Every structure is written in C-alpha cells, then in structure tokens.
Amino acid sequence: MDWSAFSLSIQLAFGTLAVLLPLGLICGRWLARTTFRGRAWLEAIILLPLVLPPTVMGYYLLVALGGNSPLGHFLQNSWGISLTFNFAGLLLASVLFNIPFMFQPIQRAFEAIPQNLNEAAQVSGLSAWATFLKVELPLAWPGILSALVLTFVHTLGEFGVVLMIGGSIPGETRTLAISIYDSVQSFDLEAANTMSLALLMFSLVAVALSLFLSGRRTRSVRRAG
C-alpha cells in the first residue's frame, strides 16, 4: 500500500469538500429557487464535467494555468503562485471536476422542499436565515449527505484530470489512483491489487453509510411530520 498516495488522496478529498460544500449550498439553493433566462445553459455548464473526458478538462486547465499562459505567467511573476504540478493545482482541478457531484444532489434536495413550508415559516415570524437553518437545511440533509459522499468518493478515484494537471510526483501529486496506474505500469500487480481493493472497499462502505444515514434521516423527518 502506498500510504503517501493514500494520505494525499484523503487530503485532496477533504480539501475539495471544504471548498465545494459552501458553494454547493449557496448555488444549489439559488438554482432551486430561481428562474431566469439562460438557466439551461448555466446548468449545462455545471453538468459538463459529467460528460467531458477528464483528460480534456485536465488539458485545458494545463493550458490555462501553465507557466506559458497569460494567467499562469501573471500568477507566477506577481504572486509567486504556480497551479500546475503541485497540490494547489490538484485541488483546483478537483474542485472544478466535482462541481456537478456536489451541486446537483443539493439542488434537487432543495427543489423537493415545498414552497409553502417556507411561506409558513415566514408567517410564523422566522427570518430567512432562521428558515434556512431550521426548516430547509434539515429537510435537504439527505441530499447534502449524498453530495458529500459522492464528491468524496469521486475525488479518491480521480485519475485523468489529476494526472494532466499534477503529474505523478511522490508526496506532492501522486494520488492513490495514479499510484495504482504506476504500479500496473511497473508490473507490480500485487501492490496494484492491494490499493485497488482498498479503494473499492472504502468507496463501498462510504456509499453504504451514506444510504443508511440518508434513509434514517428521511424516516425521522417523515415521523416528525
């Protein structure tokens, strides 16, 4: 087991959640409650990583952020920041590639909340913030939990976009998925099998736990109602 790669993958997954969760709550709820022209195009852009090959997205990120690009050149010369072949670049790529896995379940969860509950809460004297915390957030929790688990597990298994933007630098950008690939390339099938099995079991347990907690929460809300 490549523990360094495993640790890096876990850090990347939690970092991605930390960035995307507040954005997902804000944008998911906004999309669920707002209608405007061009909404279909915005949702198409959000869903694009689901159908776009990871290597394509990784390539364009590499072109956009590389040292020869205007943005990459500006960041490097003005701030000393590089977003390629390091953890910061991996995190940015992971955040962009996981947007649909975080935004979509949260949006659907807020869309499922009847509008009359919000109106009843406001009539009862609750502020918009209190309504969000005490009414909407508990009802949307199963969808939020699903978004967290999907994003976390998907980040652990990311390969194409991570390889393109970060390469395979031990302790810096070599995630578990890349380590598995490197092991296969060097014919170390025992190591590849061990890491693949660990990733499989970890993902299976995470998804099962999400479904259990989500179902339990849904039953509790129904009984309370």
Image (cartoon, grey):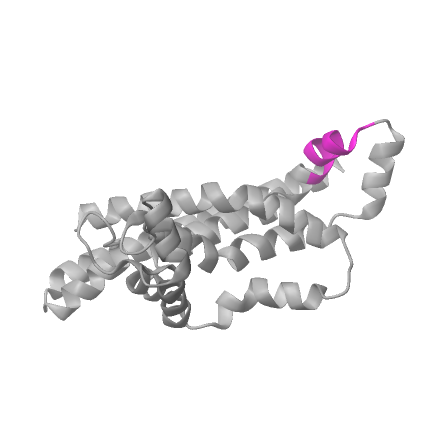
* Residue 40 coordinates in the image, percent (x, y): 69, 67
Q: Quadrant of the C terminus?
A: top right
* 72 falls in the magenta region: no
Q: Is residue 30 above or below residue 70?
A: above
**85 lies left or right of 102:** left
Residue at the extreme right of the image, as rendered: 123
- Could you tell me if residue 200 is visible in this image? yes
Q: Residue furthest left?
A: 187
> Could you tell whether 67 is left or right of 39 in the image?
left
160 displayed left or right of 97: left
Residue sitting at 17 percent across and 51 percent down? 170
Q: Which quadrant of the figure has residue 197?
A: bottom left
Residue 161 location in percent, x, y?
36, 64
Is residue 131 found inside the magenta-colored segment of the image? yes
**127 or 225, which is in the foreground?**
127
**In the depicted view, which residue is nearer to us: 155 or 58?**
58
Going 76% across and 51% down the picture, which residue do you hit? Answer: 33
Residue drawn at point x = 29 percent, y = 63 percent: 163
Q: Which residues are magenta?
A: 126-136
Residue 113 position in % (x across, y down): 75, 48
Q: How many marks do you count on the picture?
A: 0
The answer to whether residue 203 is visible is no
87 relative to 181 in the view: left or right? right
88 above or below 55?
above
In the image, 10 versus 99, the foreground residue is 99
Residue at 15 percent across and 63 percent down: it is 183
Q: What secondary structure do most residues of the magenta stretch adopt?
A: helix
Task: Compare residues 37 and 192 and report the one nearer the observer.
Answer: 37
Q: Position of residue 147 (x, y in %)?
A: 53, 51
